[in-house]
Amino acid sequence: MKLRRLTGRDVRRLAISRQHLDGGVRPSLLDVIRDLGCVQLDPIRHVERTHWLVLWSRLGCFDRAELDKLRWEERAVLEYWAHAASLVLTEEYPLHRWHMDLLADDTKSRFARSFKTWYEADKETLEPLQAHILDRLRTEGPLLSREIEDDSGQPSRWANGRNTNRLLDYLWSVGQVGIVQRRGNQRVWGLLDEFLPDWTPRERWDAAQVTSFATQKAIRALGVATPGQIKKHFTRNVYPGLTAVLGKLTAAGILEQVEVVRQGRPLKGDWYLHTADIPLLEQIRAGDWHGRTTFLSPFDNLICDRARTELLWDFHYRIEIYLPQAKRRYGYYVLPLLHDDRLIGRLDAKMDRKSHTLHVHNLYAEEGAREDTAVTRGIHRAVQSLADFLEAKTVVWGNVPPIWGEAVRG
């Protein structure tokens, strides 16, 4: 049977729409997280922490209190592992419970084996300390790690020199404790079962159910994807039996294998489309699609797979945070610039919170970027929106590419 053929533009626009980066109706905050599957957490605040940037890119200047309400009052969102430490959905707890059980199983998990080796080497100290941590949380309620006494005096190679932190990270990974509040960037720990709302689904899934669910989640977020791209997305590298699951989902009509063509040539690999997205794809191909201009976090879901980003967007991107300044090509914390369905530039910026100033050190244009009013206006509005979201009173502009000139400064 002849495969449905998609162009690179079709794929880009479908991915942008599925991740709420198009110019359509703005979704709710919960729907953004639901459709992304996860929103990565990272402490770097050079511009702003990544989860805030990911949400701003899609929602603009939304009320940050909305996310706090979802996390700490409604408890609809949890902190747990996805492709990294992330915000994930409580409604998808069976998926994450399976991962918690996996990380506790030293016959299947390298993480569990590493922990067991460390634990057994000093069991006389660590066993009572673990019991002490759980007892404190059970009797006193949520606590910061520094509020939990560590009498062992033994340094841990893995967790800032403290056994308590190492044990808390393990207990979090296996689902005994959870992050139940934040004080600034400090985690407040509590018993996970006490934190989860009553409506949390508690059924246990097997590996096939987990892979089926995660595969569909990843494909829908990506628009179309190859098995390799699926593995890099959402529950990164944890898709047991993926080949068999793809076959079953395709046979059931849930997925459809498609062909992706760029510059007249089919791209390598088996590409899959979720059939629920065929109406959206047809709408896009009929010309009913509107893009917009925004900046993306370095960890944004759209571009976190660097190889896919280069394949479909012709955009080579690497984080330069860990490079010495002299070796950086673009800057310390650079935000890719999305305009319509192309990545057309990069923003090297820093937010000075003491002076309430957003410093735009450098704005870069990619080769082939257009020089027109729609682009320059879009960039200006995006910078101003970012400044407003960060509560900057002033934007100080540095270098701007000649093709955009003074127009982007406003």
Image (tube, grey):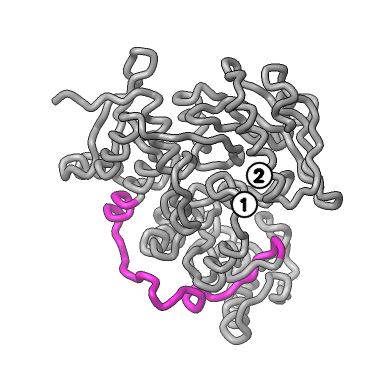
Q: Is residue 350 highlighted in magenta?
A: no
Q: Position of residue 272 (x, y in %)?
A: 29, 35
Residue at 85% across, 52% down: 354
Q: Quadrant of the N terminus?
A: top left
Q: Quadrant of residue 202?
A: bottom left
- Residue 184: x, y in percent? 71, 63
Q: Position of residue 346 (x, y in %)?
A: 65, 29
Is there CB contact under 8 Å for labels 1 and 2? yes
Q: Looking at the image, which is closer to me, 188 or 67? A: 67
**Is residue 132 positioned above or below 240 on the image?**
below
Is residue 274 depicted above or below 75 in this figure? Answer: above
Question: In which quarter of the view is residue 360 placed?
Answer: top right
Which of the pair 377/129 is nearer the observer?
377
Extreme-right residue of the structure = 355
Q: Which mark is residue 322?
A: none
- Answer few, some or many: residues within 10 Å of disc 2's Cα (few below 14, many 20 plus, some between 14 and 19): some
Could you tell me which quadrant the C terminus lies in? top right
Asked whether residue 126 is in view, the answer is no
Residue 57: x and y in percent read 57, 44
- Left or right: where 68 falls relative to 384: left
Which residues are the magenta region?
184-213
Query: What's the distance in space between the residues labelled 1 and 2, CA to CA?
Result: 7 Å
Please state which amino acid type lies under the numbered disc 2: Ser
Q: Secondary structure at mark 2?
A: helix
Q: Which residue is mark 1?
A: 61
Q: Which residue is under mark 2? A: 385
> Please, what secondary structure does the residue beneath circle 1 have?
loop
Q: Earlier in the sequence, mark 1 or mark 2?
A: 1
Name the side, left or right, on which 182 lies relative to 192: right
- Residue located at (31% from left, 66% from top): 204
Q: Amino acid at mark 1?
A: Cys
Disc 1 residue crowd, few under 14, some 14–19, many 20+, Cα 10 Å:
some
